[in-house]
Amino acid sequence: MTKTISGKTALQIVVAVLAATPVLVGLEGVLSGPDFLDVAASWPIDLDSHFRFLSGFFLAIGIAWYSCIPDIETKTERFRLLAACTFAGGLARLVSLFAAGLPSRGHVAGLSIELLAVPALVWWQSRVANKAAENAQLSGA
């Protein structure tokens, strides 16, 4: 007998896997500062401060994505807010690509997730939420 997972469960798994990146990278950035990127260690203190602040923000967004996983079908507003924040970060990364040049593969992967995968996740979460609402109406809940 083959057991398949539901669209909701699959979405929860994908969000859990993808949210690991901002959590782990954000934590590393907070702890290591710009040194995390293997750059020459002569940077202004203000850059270190700003980098760690943004890393903390990245960490918080990753944790917030995890807060969407339980009952993901009911977390549409939070999901969309986090998606908008993530997409905005991707747009900023795109500005950097045009202004400063092609970044490392890891940053290109992040850009792809932020601008392509995140909108797809919003669409997917919407479908899961709509299906849950339809099922609730059918069951009289």
Image (spheres, rainbow, N blue to C red):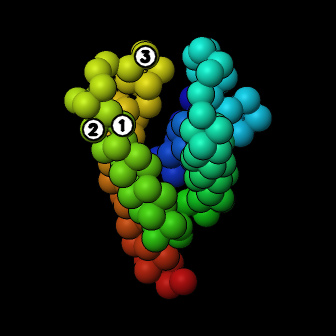
Element on which disc 2 rests = helix
In the picture provided, is 124 more to the left or to the right than 66?
left
Q: CA distance from mark 3 to mark 1?
A: 12 Å
Question: For the residue marked with disc 3, what is the amino acid?
Answer: Ser
- Identify whether 103 is placed above or below 16: above
Q: Number of numbered discs present?
A: 3
Mark 3 or mark 2: name the one nearer the start of the chain.
2
Mark 3 or mark 1: name the one nearer the start of the chain.
1
Can residue 15 be seen here? yes
Depth check: 60 or 96 in front?
96
Can residue 124 be seen here? no
Which residue is the site of mark 3?
A: 104
Residue at image coords 50%, 84%: 140
Question: For the residue marked with disc 2, what is the amino acid?
Answer: Val
Residue 6 tag number: none
| Quarter holding residue 67 | bottom right
Residue at image coords 65%, 19%: 41
Residue at image coords 52%, 51%: 8
Assess whether mark 1 and mark 3 are in contact (beta carbons under 8 angstroms): no
In the picture provided, is 88 more to the left or to the right than 74?
left
Residue at image coords 42%, 62%: 80
- Identify whether 46 is placed above or below 106: below
